[in-house]
Image (cartoon, rainbow, N blue to C red):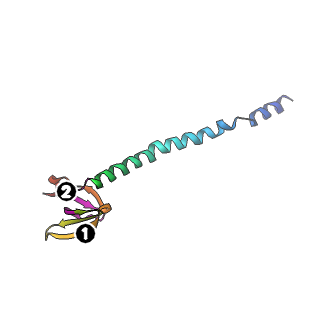
Amino acid sequence: MLPNLILLQASASNPLLQALPIVVIFGIFYFLLFLPMQKQKKQQKKMLEELKPGDTVVTNGGIVGSITAADGDMLILRVKPDNVKLQFARSAVASIVSTDVVK
């Protein structure tokens, strides 16, 4: 009769303790994956909002150019060596390049 009692007690564990590892895993994913992605998106949005004529940028396609005009969601980039002007969506800018790299 004693072995049956031990089996009944082992199978009747607390459901909250069974769900605890799943909650911990979701917490780890949030802090390691989702939180840094949200921070990166905020930085990218801030950078796009602060673009102004004269900034040198790299587009998502890898084109390096200098902003000559900014009108709403559209930017006009001057691309060297022939000073060709190209129109891009503001969201197509990947990053701002420091002036030391371009020269």
Q: Residue furthest top?
A: 2
Tell me the magenta residue range: 50-69
Quarter of the view holding residue 23: top right
52 drawn magenta: yes
User: Where in the figure is residue 103, as x and y percent of width and height?
Assistant: 12, 57
Q: Amino acid at mark 2?
A: Asp
Q: Position of residue 24 (x, y in %)?
A: 55, 39
Instruction: Name the side, left or right, on which 6 lies relative to 72.
Output: right
The amino acid at mark 1 is Gln
User: Which residue in the structure is indicated by mark 2?
Assistant: 55
Which residue is at the front of the view, 70 or 24? 70
User: Viewed as shown, does residue 29 lie left or right of 42?
Assistant: right
Does the magenta run of residues contain 99? no
Neighbor class of circle 2 (other Cα within 10 Å; few <14, some 14-19, many 20+) is: some
| Left/right of residue 72 with respect to residue 39 in the rendered view | left
Q: Position of residue 64 (x, y in %)?
A: 22, 62
> Could you say which quadrant of the image residue 56 lies in?
bottom left
The residue that mark 1 highlights is 87
